[in-house]
Image: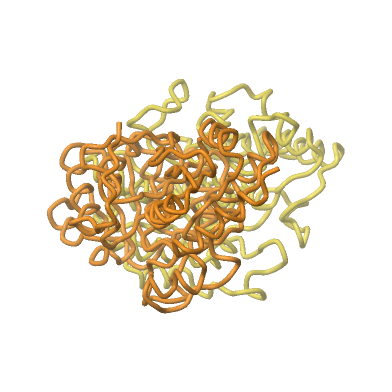
Amino acid sequence: MLTPLKEFATDIRIQQMEEFKARGFGHVGGSLSITDCLAALYGGIMRIDPKNPNWEDRDRLVVSKGHSGPALYAALALKGYFPLETLKTLNQNGTTLPSHCDRNLTPGVDMTTGSLGQGASTACGMALGLKLSGKDSRVYLILGDGECQEGQVWEMALFAAQHKLGNFIAFLDYNKRQLDGYVTDICDLEDPAAKFESFNWYVKRIKGDDPDKIYETILETQKNQKDRPAMIVLDTVKGGGVKQIEDTTLNHHLNMTTELADEIIKQLIKQKEG
Amino acid sequence: MFKCIYNGEKEAKAGKTVFGETIRKMIEEDPQVVYLDADLMNSIGTSGLEKSFPNQVIEVGIQEANMAGLSGGLSAVGKKPFMHTFASFAGRRCYDQVFISIAYAKNNVRVIGSDPGITSAYNGGTHMPFEDICLYRAIPHSTVIEFTDSAMTAALLPVIKERPGLTYCRLSRKNCIAIYSEDSVFEPGVANILRDGKDAVIFACGYMVSESLKAAETLEKEGISTAVVDMFTIKPLDTAKVLEFAEKTGAVVTAENGNVVGGLGAAVAGFLSETRPTPVIRVGVKDEFGQVGTPEYLAGVYGLTPADVVAAVKKSISLKK
C-alpha cells in the first residue's frame, strides 16, 4: 500500500501523462522530477484554499523552472482548483494551461515564470513583501539545476540571506540534466548545497523521490531555519518515477504517443493498486 | 491644470532633491509604498531613508535584474514598488526581468530611470541612455513618461503610485529649466500646450522642452509662429493633440534627448503617417553612442540645441505642400 502522499504523487504523474497524451508532446522530464516535491507541498505543507485561490493569507509557490507547469497543473487540478478535464487542454489554442506557468491564466498559479532565473527574484520579493507586512505566510520556490547557471539566481541568494527571509524555502530539482545534456558536462554546479551554505542559507540535501521524506524535511527546516532562507537540494532523476522516461537520454521535451502514455498510465495505476 | 512659468531660468531645487522629498512623503502617507534602489541612493536623494523606514525602503545592492524581479514579487503581494537606477541600467541591465516579471506578469511597478540622455554628462558612453524610451515603448501596455521639471516630478509621482501595470519614468537629477508652477497638476496621457502657434508645432519631451521654447522665441522674432507641446507622456501618446496640431500647422517637429530610433519622434511620425501624413522632422540623437562632456557640449555634438530645433522647424515648413 502506498502512503497517502505517495498515492498523491502517483496521481499527479498519471494526470501529467493525460496532459502530454492529449497534446502529443511536452516538457516531460523536468515535470516528473518535481512531482514528489509538489505532492509534499500540496499534500499538507502549504496553507491554501482551492476555493479561494487569491486568499491573501495563503502560502505561495513559485515554480521558477516554469516549463514544469504540467506537473503543477496536475497537482492543482487534483486539489480542486479547476476540473481534471481542463488538463487535456494543455498547450491547446486558447488554453488556460500554457507551457510555462502564468499567474493570470491558471487558478492557483502564484507567479508567471518561464524566463529562467526570474522566479527566484519574484518569489524572494513575495517573501520580502509578506515579511515587511508582518504576515506569517510562507513562500516556496522550485529552481532547476540548469536554471542555476543564470546569474540572477545568485543575486537573489545574496539578497535573501542579507534580508533574513526566514519565511522562504527554495528547492533545487537536482536532476543533473538540462536541455542539451548533462549539467556536469555543460556548466557544472559542483556541490550546490555547499554553495548555498556559503551564501548563509539553511541547507538540507536529500533524495527527492520520496514525498514523505520531503514533507518531514520541510517541517524540520521550518523549525530550524530561524531567520535564514532555506534551500532543500533534492537529488532527483529527470523523468523520475517513470522508467521509460528516465531511460531516455534527452528527455527535456518529448513526443508522447497515445500508446506510450497509456502504457505509462497503466503502469502507474498498477503501482497504486500495489 | 498647469501653469507655465518658463523664463529660461533654472529651478531652485535639483531634481534629485525633489525626488527624495516626494518619495519620503509617499512612504509616510502610504504604508504599501516600497522604494528599492541598486546602490544609487546617494546619487538620487534617497540616502538615509532605509534607516528611517526599514520596512519600506530596500537597498538591494548592485543587482538590477534581481531588483526588477523583487519589485514584481512585492507587487504580487500587494505592495506599491518604486525601483530606481540610472536610465542606462533600467533599460539595458534588466530588460527581460522588467518585460516578464513585471509587465507580462501584470504586476504594478514604477521604474525610475535617472540621468536620461546627455544629462548623464561625465559618466559618459557606458552610462548615457539614448535607447531607454525605445526599449520601454516596446513593452506591451507600458506607460512611458519623462518628467519635464521638478514641479512635474513632485506632482506626478503620487499619481503614478496608483497606476496599474508598468510605468517607466525618466528623471533628471540636476536642476532643470523651470517650466511649471509648483501647484501645477498633470494627467498621464494628456500633453500640455505650452505655447500656441500656427506655422509649425514642436512636440518635445524632457530636456528638449526648454530648448524648444527657446527655439520658438527665436522663430517668433523671424515671424514664424511655432507651437510647443510638452509630450511628457510618450506612451500612451496624446494622439488627439498630435492630430489637432498637425492639422492646424501642417509642419511637425519632434525633439527628444535620446535616439530617434524608436523614440518620441518615431511615435509621432508613426501615428501621423497612418492618420494624416504630415512632414515630421525629428530632432534627437542620430543613432550614436554617448560620450563624456557637459550637457551643453553634448547638445552641440548630437544636434540637440535650440538652433537645431529652429533648423528643423524651417525644414518642416519647407516640406509643407
Name the quarter where the N terminus of chain A is drawn. top right
Residue A152 shown left or right of residue A221 in the figure: right
Please state the horizontal and vertical placement of residue B62, each as a whole percent of the image. Answer: 36, 68
Q: At 60% across and 33% down in the image, what residue appears?
A: B247
Q: Is residue A188 above or below residue B83?
A: below
From the viewer's side, name the closer residue of A109 and B69.
Answer: B69
Q: Foreground residue, B157 or B313?
A: B313
Q: Position of residue B183 (x, y in %)?
A: 21, 37
Does residue A259 sit above or below B16 in this rendering?
above
Residue A139 sits in quarter:
top left
- Res. B56 visible in picture: yes
Residue B89, image x and y in percent? Answer: 44, 64
Name the quarter where the C terminus of chain A is drawn.
Answer: top right
Q: Is residue B182 left or right of residue B216?
A: left
**Is B240 on the left or on the right of B292, as rendered?**
right
Residue that appears at 51% across and 42% down: B235
The color chain A is rendered in? yellow
| Above or below for B199 versus A192 | above
The orange one among the chains is: B
Name the quadrant containing residue A15. top right
**Residue shown at 29%/49% (left/top)?**
B6
Q: Nearer the viewer, residue A28 or B199?
A: B199
Q: Where is residue B154 drawn, in percent x and y?
A: 25, 45
